[in-house]
Image (cartoon, helix red, strand yellow):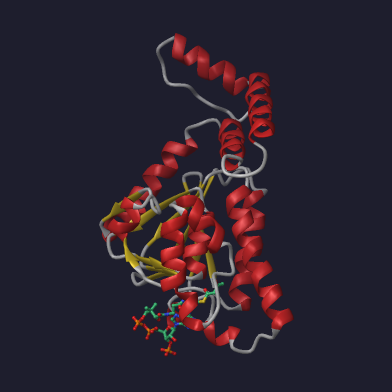
Amino acid sequence: MIGLERREGAAIVTVDRPEAMNALDLEHLEALRERLAELAADAEARVVVLTGAGEKAFVAGADIKYMQGLDVLGARRWGELGHECGNLLETMPKPTIAALNGFALGGGCELALACDLRLASANARLGQPEINLGVLPGWGGSLRLARATTLGFAKELVLTGRQIGAEEALERGLVNAVHEPGELMDKTLELCRTLAAKSPLALAYAKEAVNLALQGDHRANLATEARLFAMLFATEDQTEGMAAFAEKRQPEFRGR
Ligand code: CAA
């Protein structure tokens, strides 16, 4: 199942399929997409966290046994469904965090890469082992891994299938922080509280602007940044944020 728990403005989405290391089959991937689409439009969910049930795995990838039965058209649809989940995580107008509590392999690593931020437990293992199955990363990993790290490192992981530990992932910029397994969720919620205290409007526009960084036309992207920046000056949150600075107090953002 795909669990949902709400805590202090954060929506925690849990892939819960421990018998398969939280690998995603069609039922679970469709349920994940529905859940993410709902949360994208849910103003109460200020931050969305994606994690896996148990202590062993975040998501050990797409379900290999399910994929054994796919033909070319089926594989195309399967890839597109994974992309829809990744695109929701990447573009929903609020921060998304992957809390990597164990194996994040193949499609699991790819969904994590689509999130805005990644926190890993010290026992997490990341990688794109699809090459060992005679395929390639099909849920965005061949592109997002290069964007998150470097082209050379992405090629190394994608072409060799090598798995890396949390510390190497941190050194490579693949994750933002590493925490002890028992502390991962507390640290994730701490980050959620930090984010939930910001203006949700500014967060949404800031995410949109940063998402443009490695794509498209640079001048056009700068023009978009200027537009998004200017639009925030029509919000109460901008007035409040700047007034709070001038008055030497903490701002109280209302999302207006
Ligand atoms: N698909 C289906 N079943 C999986 C799975 C996956 N991706 N990962 C683990 N499982 C299942 C195992 O088959 C096993 O089931 P049974 O008990 O029925 O045999 C169960 O989960 C437990 O796994 P292991 O016994 O293998 O546990 P382990 O601790 O020895 O190893 C592991 C853990 C290293 C994660 C190992 O299971 C593994 O290598 N899994 C596959 C990882 C992988 O290749 N992921 C990429 C998938 S392809 C993909 O994601 C394509 C894409 O880009 C969209």
Res. 117 in view: yes
Residue at x-position 28% and y-position 54%: 179
Q: Position of residue 217 (x, y in %)?
A: 67, 38
Q: Looking at the picture, does residue 165 appear above or below residue 212?
A: below
Q: Position of residue 187 (x, y in %)?
A: 34, 48
Q: Which of 8 and 92 is in front in this view?
A: 92
Q: Looking at the picture, does residue 178 appear above or below residue 56?
A: above
Q: Which residue lies furthest to the top in this view?
A: 246
Q: Which residue lies furthest to the front in this view?
A: 152
Q: Position of residue 13 (x, y in %)?
A: 51, 60
Q: Looking at the picture, does residue 18 appear above or below residue 223?
A: below
Q: Residue furthest right?
A: 73
The N terminus - image quarter: bottom right
The C terminus - image quarter: top right
Q: Position of residue 250 (x, y in %)?
A: 42, 21
Q: Does residue 160 appear to the left or right of 202 in the view shown?
A: left
Ligand 1's quadrant is bottom left
Residue at x-position 47% and y-position 38%: 195
Residue at x-position 71% and y-position 73%: 77
Res. 11 in view: no
Q: Nearer the viewer, residue 179 or 250?
A: 179
Residue at x-position 28% and y-position 65%: 123
